[in-house]
């Protein structure tokens, strides 16, 4: 009998040590996460203060640069980009020196800074701040008809449309405007609609850790409307689901029904 008692006591002691070890690991993990969030917050404040000071001094705020080229090739300068636009103007049969086109290269490069600004933005950083005041809310949050414009990576012509996004929050939610900005971050790059859909859903799923995410994108592609087959008004639809949306067809139906409903 004493041997049995000792065996149970040893097992209980072992389980208690494991429990304390798990609690210690969880506590250390929370401390690391808290420290990381504080570091990001300080970095964000430093960048904001620097931008504010630059505006106060009359200098332009620092613009996030495009990422380096994958093969290590030095990135072309603004002057080289403008020269490339002049070459394209000459290629199509225009005279880059005529009055109406003198400033076109500068305007095009400036427009590219805006149209492709997504390369200098980080969706994970944007989604880092969340809010815990959700009470007993346990349904999904849906943003419908988020307008966007992007550019086809095959022909570099626009495609324009709307994104519909839903997610099941777990304890915390993200600001609604942040979801719309995530769409812009990935749309303001050279894209295919399929890749755009997957990038949006992966960013939300990995950063927010929700019970599930649903993304639907519908768009008209100018590479089909303006060239080639020249069929105007054709809408391309893509969807992707994770978690509860992927595993439960009824939730997919509910999401699509709410997207399609109009009061």
Image (cartoon, helix red, strand yellow):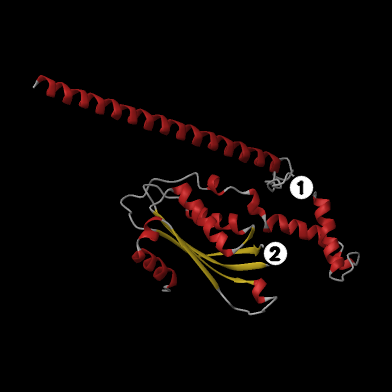
Residue 103 shows up from this direction: no
Which residue is at the front of the view, 114 or 27? 27
Q: Where does label 2 land, which residue?
A: 156
Q: Nearer the viewer, residue 107 or 191?
A: 191
Q: Is residue 218 above or below residue 210?
A: below
- Residue 9 image position (x, y, % from top left): 18, 23
Label 1's element? Answer: loop
Percent x, y for residue 153?
Answer: 66, 62
Image coords of residue 259 (percent x, y): 44, 69
User: Looking at this view, is 54 or 222 the one in front?
Assistant: 222
Task: Identify which residue is drawn at 67% across, 79% down.
Answer: 229
Numbered-mark total? 2
User: Can you say whether 132 is above or below 29 in the image?
Assistant: below
What residue do we see at 37% from left, 68% from top?
253
Which residue bears the numbered disc 1? 75
Image position of 229 (left or right of 75) = left
Q: Quadrant of the C terminus?
A: bottom left
- Tell me the quadrant of the picture where the N terminus can be found: top left
Give the class, few, some or many, for how many residues have Cα within 10 Å of label 2's Cα (few <14, many ≥20).
some
For the residues labelled 1 and 2, say whether their Cβ atoms are less than 8 Å apart. no
What's the distance in space between the residues labelled 1 and 2, CA to CA?
A: 19 Å
Q: Is residue 239 above or below residue 133?
A: below
The reply, left or right, for residue 47 in relation to residue 107 is left
- Disc sitting over residue 251 in the figure: none
């Amino acid at each position: 009998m004493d041997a049995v008692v000792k065996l149970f006591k040893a097992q209980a002691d072992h389980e208690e040590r494991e429990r304390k070890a798990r609690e210690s690991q969880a506590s250390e993990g929370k401390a690391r996460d808290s420290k990381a969030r504080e570091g990001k917050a300080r970095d964000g404040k430093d960048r904001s203060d620097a931008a504010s000071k630059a505006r106060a001094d009359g200098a332009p705020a620092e613009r996030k640069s495009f990422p380096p080229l994958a093969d290590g090739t030095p990135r072309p300068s603004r002057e080289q980009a403008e020269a490339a636009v002049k070459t394209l103007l000459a290629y199509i049969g225009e005279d880059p020196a005529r009055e109406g086109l003198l400033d076109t290269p500068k305007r095009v490069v400036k427009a590219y800074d805006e149209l492709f600004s997504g390369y200098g933005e980080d969706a994970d950083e944007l989604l880092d701040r969340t809010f815990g005041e959700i009470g007993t809310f346990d349904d999904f949050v849906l943003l419908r008809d988020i307008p966007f414009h992007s550019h086809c990576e095959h022909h570099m012509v626009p495609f324009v449309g709307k994104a519909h996004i839903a997610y099941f929050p777990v304890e915390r939610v993200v600001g609604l405007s942040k979801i719309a900005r995530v769409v812009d971050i990935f749309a303001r790059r050279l894209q295919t609609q399929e890749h755009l859909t997957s990038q949006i859903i992966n960013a939300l799923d990995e950063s927010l850790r929700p019970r599930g995410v649903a993304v639907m994108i519908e768009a008209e592609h100018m590479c089909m409307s303006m060239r080639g087959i020249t069929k105007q008004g054709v809408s391309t639809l893509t969807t992707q689901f994770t978690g509860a949306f992927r595993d439960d067809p009824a939730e997919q139906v509910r999401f699509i029904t709410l997207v399609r409903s109009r009061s």
